Structures are given as structure tokens and as C-alpha cells.
Image: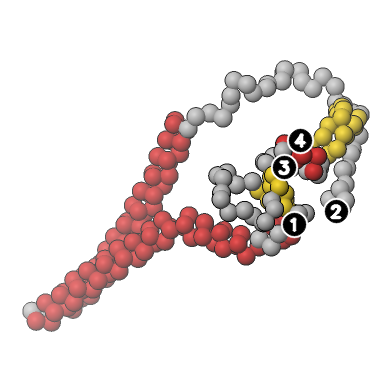
Amino acid sequence: MATIRAFGWVSDNVSHNNHLLNTSQRPAYLSAMLQQWLSMTLKMVTAFVAIAVIILSTQLSANAALTGASLTTLGLFSLVLTGFVRSFTNLEVRMGSVNRLKKFFEETPSQHRRTDFFPDRDWPRRGDIELKHVSASYVYVSVLAVADFILPCPTQPTSQPLTSNPRVLSIGEKKDMSPLAVNDLTLSIRPGERVAICGRTGR
């Protein structure tokens, strides 16, 4: 978050996350729309049947008690049918999720490689940590230096220079200019010790 705020990427990240959220929820939106459409269709069919029953009962002088019981049963049938359609739709969605998980477990290759290091079962034999002359940096790509600015190196050559006098750095120069997050660290932590590492920003 500190890096995003420092580079002014807040609005771009918010827009990108909103786009990803809308894209991920699009199937849920469509499913909800389809369920509402099915529910409305069933209610309209039930309403037409109820109107037909009322018209027939008034024209044929049917028993009022039987007509009321028929309308009540018709309303309960509509509720049961709507619940059944929604439950079936949810079941179909869940089965699709289970099918995707099954395909994921069966077809996705394992991330374990033959070159992975697996320690012995009795590791660690001692509870101490030894670091000797450790250096690390966040820079891992080739860079272009223009005046005092460092920009990512383009993957394809371009005929348009960044400035009037761009200067390309070699790998050796890049290593000399790139700041080290950890520089020649030698550290010994004995068993049972608690160690806190605090940077210049207080983290």
C-alpha cells in the first residue's frame, strides 16, 4: 500500500480491481437475472390460471368454497414450483463448481519440481539461524538510465529515443547503481531469541 500511494497508483488500482470484481461476478448477475425471470414467468402463468378459474366459477355458478380452495391450492403450487426451480438452479451451479474443481485437481500439473529441495525429517537439528554476507536487491530487470531517472528497459527496440541523449547501462553498471535492500548482512540468532528487524521507515 505504501508503494501504491508513493507512485500515485491508487486510482488505477481501484479501477482495475473494480473491473476484475465486475468480471468475476458476471455469472452471478446472470444467474440472478435468470432466476428472477423464471420466477416472474411462473407467477404470470399462475395468475392466468387463477383468472381462468375465477371466470369459469362465476360463469358456471360453481361452489364458492371449492373455488376458494382451488385458488389457495393454486397459490401454494406456485410457491412450491418457484422454490423447486430456484433450488434446481442452485444445485446446477454447485455441480458446475464441483466439476471445475475436479478438472482442476485432475488436469493441473503439480508445482513440485525435481529440483525442489526437501530437508530431512529431523531438520532442523539445531534451533539457531546463521546468515553470512547476505546481499539482496529488488532490481531484477535491465534498466535504462536517463539523467537521474531509471526506467524499465523496453522488450523490443524502438527508433524513438526516450530523450536526446539516452545512455544504456550494462549489467555491471546496473548492479553498481541498484540499491541493495540487504547489504552484506551477517547475523547469528541463537535458540530461544526473539529478533525484530526495523528498516529506515520504522517497519
Q: Which residue is mark 2?
A: 201
Crowdedness near tag 1: few (<14), some (14–19) or many (≥20) residues, C-alpha within 10 Å: few
Name which of mark 2 and mark 1 comes first in the sequence: 1
Q: Quadrant for the N terminus, please.
A: bottom right
Are dots 2 and 1 in contact, CB under 8 Å?
Answer: yes
Q: Could you tell me the amino acid type at mark 4?
A: Gly
Name which of mark 1 and mark 3 comes first in the sequence: 1
Residue drawn at (71%, 59%) of the image: 7
Q: Secondary structure at mark 4?
A: helix
Q: Which residue is mark 4?
A: 172
- The tag on residue 169 is 3
Instruction: Tell whether 24 sits left or right of 143.
Output: left
Q: Could you tell me the amino acid type at mark 3?
A: Leu
Q: Could you tell me the amino acid type at mark 1?
A: Ala
Residue drawn at (55%, 44%) of the image: 156
Q: Disc 3 and disc 4: Cα gap in Å? A: 8 Å
- The tag on residue 152 is none
Q: Disc 2 and disc 1: Cα gap in Å? A: 11 Å
Crowdedness near tag 4: few (<14), some (14–19) or many (≥20) residues, C-alpha within 10 Å: few
Which quadrant would residue 177 be assigned to in this image? top right
Name which of mark 1 and mark 4 comes first in the sequence: 1
Along the viewing direction, whichever of 95 and 190 lies nearer the viewer: 190
- The tag on residue 2 is 1
Along the viewing direction, whichever of 94 and 70 lies nearer the viewer: 94
